[in-house]
Image (cartoon, helix red, strand yellow):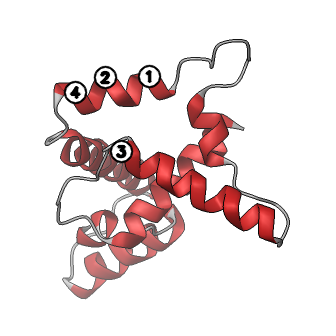
């Protein structure tokens, strides 16, 4: 189940990997539902571990800044996070300027991902996960 923490494998791939490992090591196969629950539990534990790893080096000041991103902007229903996560839609000079200002704003927040042994594919997967959860 090592691959559960290293990539963005779908549960079906993890299930196939686990059953292949069991067969390869001549272990008596459990029932399908038991193996499904095991895969789900391992994935859940790996997600929790990943979030803890990412939060481990986040200081109080960074946490405060991240929390502020979720508060609505004065006179608007949108938060700063909502405004920053939506990039330019058109390919034009003004859109490029807007994109560069957006990057400058994000860099100005001083929020950096901690140095962790998390593969980039997992970080990208979390970004996608967070986007879908907020929609």
| Residue 95, above or below 67 | below
Secondary structure of the residue carrying numbered label 1 = helix
Disc 3 designates what residue? 44
Disc 1 designates what residue? 68
Residue count near mark 1 (Cα–Cα under 10 Å), binned few <14, some 14–19, many ≥20: some
- Please report contact status of discs 2 and 4: CB closer than 8 Å, yes or no: yes
Secondary structure of the residue carrying numbered label 3 = helix
Residue count near mark 2 (Cα–Cα under 10 Å), binned few <14, some 14–19, many ≥20: few
Residue 41: x %, y % from top left: 34, 45
Of callouts 4 and 3, the N-terminal one: 3
The answer to whether residue 94 is left or right of residue 57 is: right
Residue drawn at x 70%, y 24% as measured from the top left: 78
Secondary structure of the residue carrying numbered label 2 = helix
Number of numbered discs visible in the structure rendering: 4
Residue drawn at x 68%, y 62% as measured from the top left: 97
Disc 2 designates what residue? 64
Between the residue at mark 2 and the residue at mark 4, the CA separation in whole angstroms equals 5 Å
Residue drawn at x 17%, y 60% as measured from the top left: 116
Residue count near mark 4 (Cα–Cα under 10 Å), binned few <14, some 14–19, many ≥20: few
Disc 4 designates what residue? 61
């Amino acid at each position: 189940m090592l691959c559960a923490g290293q990539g963005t494998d779908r549960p079906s791939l993890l299930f196939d990997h686990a059953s292949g490992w069991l067969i390869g090591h001549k272990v008596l196969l459990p029932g399908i539902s038991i193996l499904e629950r095991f895969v789900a539990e391992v994935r859940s534990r790996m997600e929790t571990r990943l979030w803890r790893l990412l939060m481990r080096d986040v200081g109080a000041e960074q946490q405060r800044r991240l929390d502020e991103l979720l508060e609505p902007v004065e006179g608007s229903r949108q938060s700063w996070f909502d405004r920053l996560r939506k990039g330019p839609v058109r390919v034009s000079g003004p859109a490029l300027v807007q994109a560069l200002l957006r990057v400058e704003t994000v860099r100005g927040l001083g929020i950096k991902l901690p140095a962790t042994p998390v593969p980039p594919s997992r970080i990208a997967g979390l970004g996608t996960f967070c986007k879908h959860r907020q929609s």
